[in-house]
Amino acid sequence: MRWSRLRRRRAMGHSGPLDCAAAATLLQEYLDSELEPGHARRVAEHLEVCRRCGLSAETYRSIRSSLERSQQAPADALDRLRHFADHVADQPPGIASSDA
C-alpha cells in the first residue's frame, strides 16, 4: 500500500501533461471521482489523447457497471478490480500500444 501512495504522490507532483504511468496511477481514483478537480482534469485530458489508457478506463468502467447490474457481486470482485488497477499502473508506457 505504501508503494501506491508514493506512486500517486509522484504522479501528481508535476504540473504538465500526464504520461501513461502517472495516468494509470490515478485512474481508479479518477473513475471513482475521488481526485481534486485539477488532477481529474489532467487525467481526463490524457484519456482523451491516449488510446491505451482510454481503453483501460473503459474496461474498468465496464467491469464496474457489470458488477453494479448484478444482484450479488462475487466475493472477490473488489480485490480483482484493485488488482486490475494495480496491473495497469505497473505497466511501462508503450506496452500494447504506441499511442500516448
Image: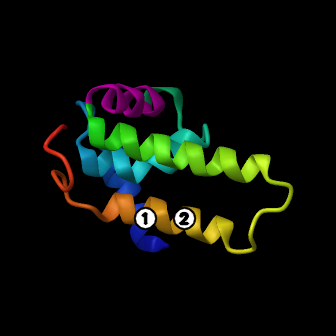
Q: Are marks 1 and 2 in contact (CB under 8 Å)?
A: yes
In this rendering, position of residue 1 left or right of residue 91: right
Name which quarter of the figure residue 15 lies in. top left
Which residue position is annotated with label 1? 86
- Label 2, secondary structure: give it: helix
Q: Amino acid at mark 1?
A: Asp
Residue at horizontal 18 percent and vertical 47 percent from the top: 97
Q: Position of residue 91 (x, y in %)?
A: 27, 61
- Image position of 9 with respect to 75: above or below: above
Name which quarter of the figure residue 57 lies in. top left
Magenta residues? 39-49
Residue at horizontal 46 percent and vertical 59 percent from the top: 85
**In-front residue for pair 26/97:** 97
Q: Is residue 2 magenta?
A: no
Please identify the quadrant where the C terminus is shown: top left
- Magenta highlight: main SS: helix
Which residue position is annotated with label 2? 82
